Amino acid sequence: MLYFRELTNLFYRGIIQIYYTQQLRFDKLHFGFRMIVRESFAMNIIYRILEVLLIILLLGVIGAVILYFYPGIFAKTPISGGTPQNRAHFYQNSAISISNVLVKAVYVVPKNREPYSGWHDILAKALDKVQRFHNLQFRGASTMNYEIFGEPIILLENNLKYDSGETTSSSPYVLLNLSGELNRRLFEKDGDLYNQAFVKKNGNEYAVLGVFYEGIGALGSPIHSRDQESIKKIAEQLGVPESVAGSIYIGPMDGFFILSREYLTNPILKSYGPTVLYHEFAHAIGFKDQYDRISGRSFSDDIMGGGRENPIEATYLGKPLLQESGVVEKK
């Protein structure tokens, strides 16, 4: 009887042990299954987020490429020129159209200096950026094109002749001393550099001479009119006497700007060199500085003010400038 009772207890203990062992295994399996499900769900969410981010990145790259090669594609009006009701004009002067702007660029070198290697490609790259900026900012109401004179113009005198007067980086005397020589040699028919195809100007073009100088200088101004009022405004803008401003004459050009080659090649300056280029060009279509020349304090954040020291991709033309140029309606 005692033997049977012990055998029965042993049997029950075995059953209980097997139950608990299997239960433990089942619990472990169940816990593992739940973890796999949780991990799969979490990974699925992560994969979905990554897919969305990848799509956004691809769309951004595609958009950047489109804007780079077709900067006017999102403009309100076609990039080939605004509608007749929305043609851009000279700043605060609707009588002078700037719907078709042509920049004629020359690289000039004093006779005691050597031309910078690769100057043509450097200049073309900068003008490409300026062209895209202008066409985009003017929303199709004005288009810019450019031509580059095919060879460096070696000047007749040493640099001291052209750098005389002020020697700061914004000396107006650089171009004042250059204008007579460039006019005689490049724009007059008996000049040694005269090129009819280059100096030709179509009737509907607003032509601007861009002088890239192997030396000191950065400024711009309109010269579209020879009347006394225009001469007075030019003198005020350049900070020179009216007698000096009145002597500026460059063939059929409506405006000019000058930029030192250093702005396009100097490691410190070249990041915003195209911005300075456009800033000086903008003076040729009437835009005024939006900063104090003495203190440097800016009155606006756009390219005529604080934005003049930003890369050209990170600056803009302010709304007031576009309003006074007939691009944006005044309210």
Image (cartoon, rainbow, N blue to C red):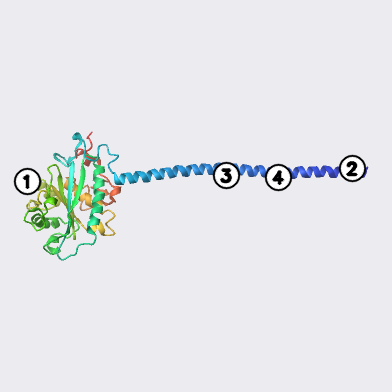
User: Comparing marks 2 and 3, which lies closer to the viewer?
Assistant: 3
What residue is disc 4 on?
25
Classify residue 126 as left or right of residue 29: left
Q: Residue furthest right?
A: 1
- Mark 4 → mark 3, Cα distance in angstroms: 21 Å
- Mark 2 → mark 1, Cα distance in angstroms: 131 Å
Work out whether mark 4 precedes mark 3 in sequence or the reverse, and give the earlier one: 4
What residue is disc 3 on?
39
Work out whether mark 2 precedes mark 4 in sequence or the reverse, and give the earlier one: 2
Q: Using the rendered image of the protein, determine whether residue 297 is visible from the camera's viewpoint.
A: no
Provide residue 127's location: percent of width, then percent of height: 23, 51
Q: Quadrant of the C terminus?
A: top left
> Under tag 1, what secondary structure?
helix
Amino acid type at circle 1 is Gln
Nearest the eye: 248 or 309: 248
As drawn, the label of residue 228 is 1
> Under tag 4, what secondary structure?
helix
Q: Is the residue marked by circle 1 packed among few (<14), some (14-19), or many (20+) residues within 10 Å?
A: few
Q: Using the rendered image of the protein, determine whether residue 196 is visible from the camera's viewpoint.
A: yes
Residue located 72% across and 42% down the image: 23
Q: Is the residue marked by circle 3 packed among few (<14), some (14-19), or many (20+) residues within 10 Å?
A: few
Identify the image quadrant of residue 174. bottom left
Classify residue 88 as left or right of residue 2: left
Work out whether mark 4 precedes mark 1 in sequence or the reverse, and give the earlier one: 4
